[in-house]
Amino acid sequence: MKKRDAYHPDYLKIYPCLKDRPDILKFLRQCDRKQEYLEYDLKVNRTRTNKRTMETVIWPQRELSYEHLLEEHQFAQQEPSPEETLLHEIELENLRCAVERLPNDERLLLHLRYWCDFSQAEIARHLGVTQQSVSYQERCILRKLKKLLKN
């Protein structure tokens, strides 16, 4: 049985809706372990007793200052945190769903503008309309997407 305490709560009991989201549960548990490590593991002195000589050795806490780590170039290639990665994935999924709800002509305009890197003038030539019309449509579509993402 898994331990349940301040660092290891039962997330399925707290958030029953996460039953179908093992990725979020895994993420929450990783955050718990990270928090436990930062709050406890790094700050505790460790002792070890030699059974033959009965000599006790104390290892000091392992917590290092942020400044020391910067000096040692520990953060030279910092990757996004698990929280940032998960939030980014959720935002992308929400955006994909919102774009799928748009009509085909609006999706085409977004595709040409943001995936094919067409200018508004190039899109206007491609669709046979004026550049001002493309600009107006783009603003309307982006407002609509913003509304869809807020809901």
Image (cartoon, rainbow, N blue to C red):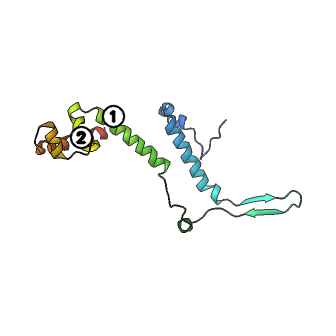
Label 2, on which residue? 112
Q: Residue at x 33, y 34 (%)?
A: 97
100 left or right of 11 in image: left
Provide the secondary structure element on which disc 1 rests.
Answer: helix
Residue type of the residue flagged with mark 2: Leu
State which quadrant residue 141 falls in: top left
State which quadrant residue 8 falls in: top right
Q: Residue at x 49, y 39 (%)?
A: 24
Mark 2 nearby-residue class (10 Å; few <14, some 14–19, many ≥20): some
| Residue 26: x %, y % from top left | 54, 40
User: Which mark lies nearer to you, 2 or 1?
Assistant: 2
**112 or 93, which lies in front?**
112
State which quadrant residue 66 falls in: bottom right
Provide the secondary structure element on which disc 2 rests.
Answer: helix
Q: Of label 2 and label 1, which has the lower sequence position? A: 1
Q: Residue at x 51, y 31 (%)?
A: 19
Q: Residue at x 24, y 40 (%)?
A: 112
Residue type of the residue flagged with mark 1: Cys
Mark 1 nearby-residue class (10 Å; few <14, some 14–19, many ≥20): few
Tell me the quarter of the image containing the N terminus. top right
What's the distance in space between the residues labelled 2 and 1, CA to CA?
18 Å
101 left or right of 21 in image: left
Please determine whether, in this image, residue 39 is positioned above or below residue 15: below
Dots 2, 1 in contact, CB < 8 A: no
**54 or 136, which lies in front?**
136
| Residue 43: x %, y % from top left | 64, 60
34 left or right of 88 in image: right
- For the question of whether residue 103 can be seen, the reply is no
Label 1, on which residue? 97
| Residue 29: x %, y % from top left | 56, 43
- For the question of whether residue 111 can be seen, the reply is yes
